[in-house]
Amino acid sequence: MSLKKSGFKGDFLTVFSDEEPLCKALGSLMCVTGAFGFTLASLAIRKIIGKL
């Protein structure tokens, strides 16, 4: 069930790309998903230490 459908009203940070995929059949490129993970980790650490 999605958060919106369940009535979630909270606030949280997200990382996403608004680019259109060039080749949907091939799936995700590992280095791109890794970069998103590192970006989320950086945001989490900055939030924990109060720099966000």
Image (spheres, rainbow, N blue to C red):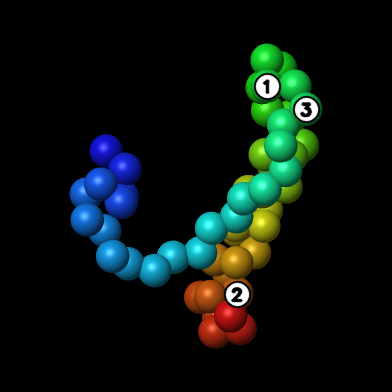
Label 2 vs 1, first from the N-terminus: 1
Q: What residue occupies the far top of the structure in this picture?
A: 25
Q: Position of residue 51 (x, y in %)?
A: 61, 83
Q: Is residue 9 left or right of residue 17?
A: left
Q: Compute the Cα span from label 1 to label 3.
A: 6 Å
Question: Which amino acid type is marked by label 2?
Answer: Arg
Residue drawn at the location 67% of the way across and 57% of the way down: 39
Q: Compute the Cα span from label 3 to label 2.
A: 33 Å
Q: Compute the Cα span from label 2 to label 1.
A: 33 Å
Q: Quadrant of the C terminus?
A: bottom right
Q: Is residue 28 left or right of residue 4?
A: right
Question: What is the count of numbered marks?
Answer: 3
Q: Which residue is mark 2?
A: 46
Give the quarter of the image for residue 9: bottom left
Question: Which amino acid type is marked by label 3?
Answer: Leu
Q: Which residue is mark 1?
A: 24
Question: Which amino acid type is marked by label 1?
Answer: Lys
Q: Is residue 38 left or right of residue 22?
A: left
Pointer 1 local density, CA inside 10 Å: few below 14, some 14–19, many at least 20: few
Label 3 vs 2, first from the N-terminus: 3
Give the quarter of the image for residue 8: bottom left
Query: Is residue 51 among what the camera can see?
Result: yes
Pointer 2 local density, CA inside 10 Å: few below 14, some 14–19, many at least 20: few
Residue drawn at the location 22% of the way across and 56% of the way down: 7
Q: Are marks 2 and 1 in contact (CB under 8 Å)?
A: no
Question: Residue 22 got which mark?
Answer: 3
Q: Is residue 47 above or below residue 39?
A: below
Q: Secondary structure at mark 2?
A: helix
Residue drawn at the location 25% of the way across and 46% of the way down: 5
